[in-house]
């Protein structure tokens, strides 16, 4: 680094004396990630929460622990190799708290996960962060039968949700494990071959206690029974009834064909047949000039009640509930004869004064009641001639 460059760095407050400075062109520069909390820090918080466990921790404490660090649909997979071959166990979210609890029930006093050279990857499609650690060590301290430290090495792959940074999938593949005894404990039993033989026996199998292995074997049976236990808790049915119901529903899903999207049937509009009265009126007025007042004559020729027949579709009859009843309200103040006379006058069929004799406009209170409409026009013409 030249003197000018060193002076420039010192002027900005950075330089070799600042241990937290990282050059953007250096190998340790990291760009900003779309998530705030780092996955490694979440695993560190998980270790601290496990260390805060006490002997009085009950099921509520373990459920709260699983809710804080594991997603509602999380899965936990553990793979290792025993004397009879490789084993692989996968449990769901409801069985995860019990797994961690069995570790401490098997004589473990402390549990922690140590990561070395882990890698992070962000998946924008699933909105998840993947933590891949090729060298992960699960460290457990056992207090009985003797104080023993067990280091279980393997590959740990964790998938976190970005929004809450909770674990969606946990996959731990165990490669090997080592059990370490204090040198002072071995020196005490050097003169006792039987005690040394007892200390030389392994406390775990592939880093797992016998209590944990028995629970994992039980999970093979419990995991498929989650639906039965959930139905028993929800509907309070007997185990036999829960099994019958689940099997029947599964048989229905296997036998029933896949549901096709239902299409709404397009109903065709039926043309209504004209009545005999309307047909006769249409024939009589076909050659005449139409006006809005000509429709009043239809009222006197339509019956009071009309019943619509049952609709038919493709030759089949609908039920009785599809009948429609149409009623017409009669206006008692309506005079059909007067309306017909007014319609005829509007069409130019009648111009005589007697055609207006029946009009309701010539009532007793009307100003035109004393004389016919044509008389007023004749009187006005006579006055104009006299004035000239």
Image (tube, helix red, strand yellow):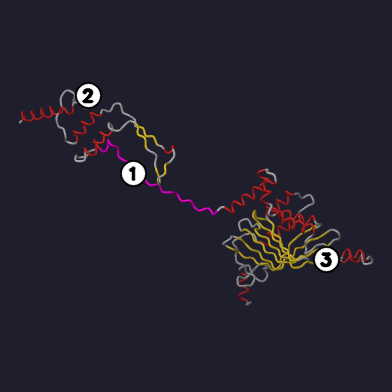
Q: Nearer the viewer, mark 2 or mark 3?
A: 2
Q: CA distance from mark 3 to mark 1?
A: 95 Å
Q: Which mark is on residue 271?
A: 1
SS class, disc 1 = loop
Furthest residue in direction bottom, as rendered: 2
Towards the viewer: 205 or 186: 205
The answer to whether residue 381 is left or right of residue 207 is left
Does the residue at mark 2 contact the one at mark 3 (Cβ under 8 Å)?
A: no
Return the residue at label 2: 363
> Where residue 174 appears, x then y in whole percent?
73, 65
Return the residue at label 3: 180
Q: Nearer the viewer, mark 2 or mark 1?
A: 1
Residue at the image position 74 percent from the left and 49 percent from the top: 59
| Looking at the image, residue 25 lies above or below residue 373 | below
**Mark earlier in primary sequence (2, 3):** 3
Region of the chain picked out in magenta, as a range:
257-279
> Where residue 367 appears, x then y in whole percent?
19, 25
Considering the image in quadrants, where does the N terminus appear?
bottom right
SS class, disc 2 = loop
């Amino acid at each position: 680094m030249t003197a000018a460059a060193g002076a420039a760095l010192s002027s900005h407050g950075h330089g070799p004396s600042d241990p937290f400075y990282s050059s953007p062109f250096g190998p340790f520069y990291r760009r900003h990630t779309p998530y705030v909390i780092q996955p490694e820090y979440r695993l560190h918080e998980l270790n601290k929460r496990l260390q805060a466990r006490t002997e009085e921790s009950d099921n509520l404490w373990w459920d709260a622990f699983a809710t804080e660090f594991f997603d509602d649909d999380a899965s936990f997979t553990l793979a290792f190799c025993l004397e009879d071959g490789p084993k692989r166990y996968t449990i769901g979210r409801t069985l995860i708290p019990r797994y961690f609890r069995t570790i401490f029930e098997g004589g473990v006093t402390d549990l922690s996960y140590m990561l070395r050279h882990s890698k992070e990857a962000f998946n924008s499609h699933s909105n998840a962060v993947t933590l891949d650690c090729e060298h992960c060590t699960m460290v457990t301290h056992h207090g009985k039968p003797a104080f023993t430290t067990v280091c279980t090495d393997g590959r740990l792959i964790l998938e976190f949700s970005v929004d809450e940074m909770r674990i969606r999938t946990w996959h731990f593949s165990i490669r090997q494990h080592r059990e370490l005894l204090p040198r002072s404990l071995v020196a005490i039993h050097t003169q006792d071959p039987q005690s040394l033989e007892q200390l030389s026996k392994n406390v775990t199998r592939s880093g797992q206690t016998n209590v944990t292995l028995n629970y994992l074997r039980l999970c093979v049976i419990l995991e498929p029974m989650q639906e039965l236990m959930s139905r028993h808790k929800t509907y309070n049915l007997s185990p036999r009834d829960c099994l019958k119901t689940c099997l029947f529903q599964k048989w229905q899903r296997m036998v029933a064909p896949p549901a096709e999207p239902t299409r709404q049937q397009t109903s065709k509009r039926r043309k209504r047949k004209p009545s005999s009265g309307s047909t006769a009126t249409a024939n009589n007025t076909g050659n005449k000039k139409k006006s809005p007042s000509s429709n009043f004559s239809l009222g006197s020729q339509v019956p009071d009640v009309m019943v619509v027949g049952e609709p038919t579709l493709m030759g089949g009859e609908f039920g009785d509930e599809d009948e429609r009843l149409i009623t017409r309200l009669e206006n008692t103040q309506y005079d059909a004869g007067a309306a017909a006379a007014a319609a005829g006058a509007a069409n130019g069929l009648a111009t005589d004064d007697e055609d207006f004799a029946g009009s309701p406009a010539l009532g007793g209170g009307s100003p035109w009641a004393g004389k016919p409409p044509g008389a007023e026009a004749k009187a006005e013409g006579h006055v104009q001639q006299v004035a000239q």
